[in-house]
Image (tube, rainbow, N blue to C red):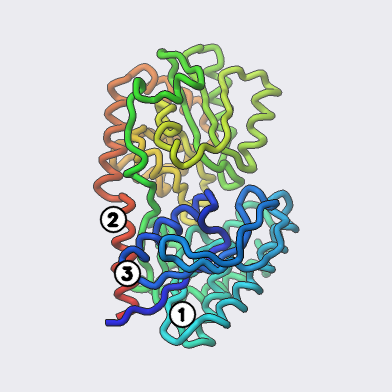
Amino acid sequence: MALPRIIFVNRFFYPDHSATAQILADLCFALSKDGLDVRVVTSRAVYDDPSIQLSGAEHVNGVQIKRIWTTRFGRKSLAGRAVDYLSFYAAAFWALLRSLRPGDLVIAKTDPPMISVVAALAASLRGARHINWLQDLYPEVAAELGIRALSGAGGKSLRIVRNLSLRSARANVVIGERMAERLEAEGVAPHAIAVIHNWSDDELVTPLVRDQCELRREWGFQDDAFVVGYSGNLGRAHEVETLLGAARRLKHDPRIRFLFIGGGHHGDGLAGRVEAEGLSNFMFQPYQPKHMLAQSLAVPDVHWLSLRPELEGLIVPSKFYGIAAAGRPVLSVTDPDGEIARLVRLHDCGLVVSPGHDEDLASAIMTLAGSPDLCRQMGESSRAMLLANYTRRGSIARWSALLRGVAD
């Protein structure tokens, strides 16, 4: 059987280091290596530095990359971000119209939001087929984050249009069971929904014990320190008040240290609040290069992650898989019935704390700090869960099977 061309659409791609770009690159390069004709329509921008402009066309690892021109105002203002989105919609639509052939498979991710509508329209006009790869659900996320224009009639109208693009798709790939439940509630047929979890590079990131983690010593953590870490983007969807409350309660215990690696809306603000309150138990480090991930994820004894409860089913914190790859337990500051909380309890790979309960978080930290064997066992369970269910190779194999099934 002759396989069709596969065209992915996403605002960021290799060599960008954002989470969506990295996971898309993993999939594209693997599919190309497997003999598929893979192409990407993306922007020339870099996620965290709008001053950088990448080349317009490139071949990398067998993947043909078409980088379209867009505005590059960046993430500092909602207005600038909206203009960036609009320019990408227009340029991507034109690029797809010019390049699509009947029978092609167009796969739209969710950056920018609602790109599924653009991809569905272009595919329909050119006789191609489309698949949606949903990392989050807009406009619901925006409405929950307080954007008023998307919480009333405007948001309802966008949902109607978005849902048309979901119902017309050959498949909708979601990254969690709660998200699948949301799509069914929106009227998407269950047979058109596939759950394929995100992944981390479980071959690059492997568990390291303290003695193997040179970065821990380089950053000055003592042997008896118990490090509570966070790695990645801490954005508007996440919650920091519970962590800050726990840090205040534990500030007089010299063993407990908090490490933040990365950035984001709340990440940038967290550093200022820590300094203003004189919390000396924090350390901040920038994003680490990919080849240092195994080391940087091994520095903490436990990682925390968070998600605002109202966003359950709309977003899944993908950093969970990197934590598991590193063989560390998880402190899940989320809805107790949320996606990550369910997995943490099912696999006994950490502890769950409801947002706002900083006393419970402080208690959970002290429990793990005082029980090295429990902490180690939970870390081992975390890695075992990943190897059994969420390896990069396994998820990519599920993607390959899905694409071949749609093409047949």
| Badge 1 vs badge 2, beta-carbon distance below 8 Å | no
Asked whether residue 138 appears in the rendered view, the answer is no
Q: Quadrant of the C terminus?
A: bottom left
Label 1 secondary element? loop
Q: CA distance from mark 2 to mark 3?
A: 18 Å
Nearest to N terminus: mark 3 or mark 1: 3
| Residue at image point 45% right, 62% down | 182
Viewer-nearest residue: 255 or 248: 255
Residue picked out by circle 1: 168
Instruction: Name the secondary structure under disc 2.
Output: helix
Q: Residue at x 51, y 44 (%)?
A: 307
| Picture mark count | 3
Which of disc 3 and disc 2 is earlier in sequence? 3
Q: Position of residue 30 (x, y in %)?
A: 35, 60
Circle 2 residue: 394
Q: Amino acid at mark 1?
A: Ser
**Label 3 neighbourhood size at 10 Å, few (<14), some (14-19), many (20+)?**
few
Residue, x 53% and y 80% (percent of image)? 99
Q: Position of residue 13 (x, y in %)?
A: 52, 58
Residue 253 point in image, percent of width and height: 50, 12
Residue 315 in the image, given as x and y percentages of width and height: 49, 53
Query: What is the quadrant of the N terminus in the image?
Result: bottom left
Query: 265 or 59: which is nearer to us?
Result: 59
Residue 35 image label:
3
Q: Is residue 126 left or right of residue 191?
A: right
Looking at the rendered structure, the kind of residue marked 2 is Gly
Q: Which one is closest to the eye, mark 2 or mark 3?
A: 3
Q: Nearer the viewer, mark 1 or mark 2?
A: 2
